[in-house]
Image (spheres, rainbow, N blue to C red):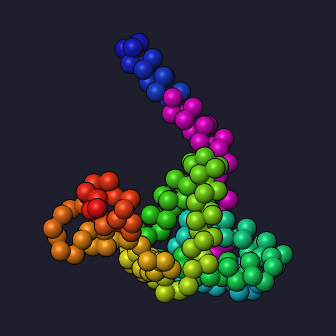
């Protein structure tokens, strides 16, 4: 009987301790619904407006941070934010998950590797749209054909036409030590 009472007391203290620990953590502040946003926030975040109310609180919080810093951005930065928001909303949930995984992998890379990737990205941005499309679809862009300015010797020009010997033809027969010199 004493064991049961002791087990009950211990169980009560464990549940009470768990409740206290949960109460000690501050609850995630509630993020506003779409209807509660200001007109300026709605204009900035309009590309994600249809999905706003179903977003997790942490994502809403991040986007509100973007909306807060948006007025201080340069016009080209503002356009980039708008374009990225539109692109993000057009992705499927699987594509978004893949993008998040790639971002996390990128954050784990050493700084010099990230710089290398950033340089490659900048080079890609400079390409014409046709080459970008080819690369996106997994096709390699055709390498430019270069024609040498001076003719290069080929095997056919080094061998005699008659095929009598396999010795190379030389420009100065007197200098050729493999053939007998005619007197």
Q: How many marks?
A: 0
View extreme (left): residue: 164
Looking at the image, residue 14 lies above or below residue 93: above
Q: In the drawing, does residue 177 fall left or right of residue 165?
A: right
Looking at the image, residue 173 lies above or below residue 44: above
Residue 27 part of the magenta-drawn span? yes
* Dominant secondary-structure state across the stretch colored magenta: helix
Q: Camera-side residue: 158 or 7?
A: 158
Q: In the drawing, does residue 172 fall left or right of residue 85?
A: left
Residue 35, given in percent of the width and then of the height, sits at 66, 82
The part of the image, by quadrant, that contains residue 88 is bottom right
The part of the image, by quadrant, that contains residue 121 is bottom right
Residue shown at 64% from the left, 56% from the top: 115
Residue 158, given in percent of the width and then of the height, sits at 31, 68
Residue shown at 59% from the left, 42% from the top: 22
Q: Camera-side residue: 62 or 108?
A: 108
Residue 60, given in percent of the width and then of the height, sits at 63, 68
In magenta, the rendered stretch is 14-36
């Amino acid at each position: 009987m004493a064991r049961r009472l002791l087990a009950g007391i211990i169980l009560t203290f464990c549940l009470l301790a768990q409740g206290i620990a949960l109460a000690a953590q501050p609850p995630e502040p509630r993020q506003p619904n779409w209807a509660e946003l200001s007109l300026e926030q709605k204009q900035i975040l309009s590309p994600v407006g249809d999905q706003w109310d179903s977003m997790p609180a942490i994502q809403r919080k991040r986007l509100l941070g973007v909306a807060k810093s948006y007025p201080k951005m340069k016009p080209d930065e503002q356009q980039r934010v708008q374009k990225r928001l539109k692109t993000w909303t057009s992705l499927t949930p699987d594509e978004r998950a893949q993008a998040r995984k790639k971002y996390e992998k990128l954050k784990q890379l050493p700084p010099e590797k990230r710089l290398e990737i950033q340089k490659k990205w900048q080079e890609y941005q400079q390409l014409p749209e046709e080459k970008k499309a080819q690369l996106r679809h997994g096709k390699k862009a055709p390498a430019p054909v270069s024609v040498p300015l001076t003719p290069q010797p080929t095997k056919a020009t080094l061998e005699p036409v008659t095929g009598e010997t396999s010795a190379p033809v030389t420009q100065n027969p007197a200098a050729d030590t493999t053939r007998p010199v005619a007197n």
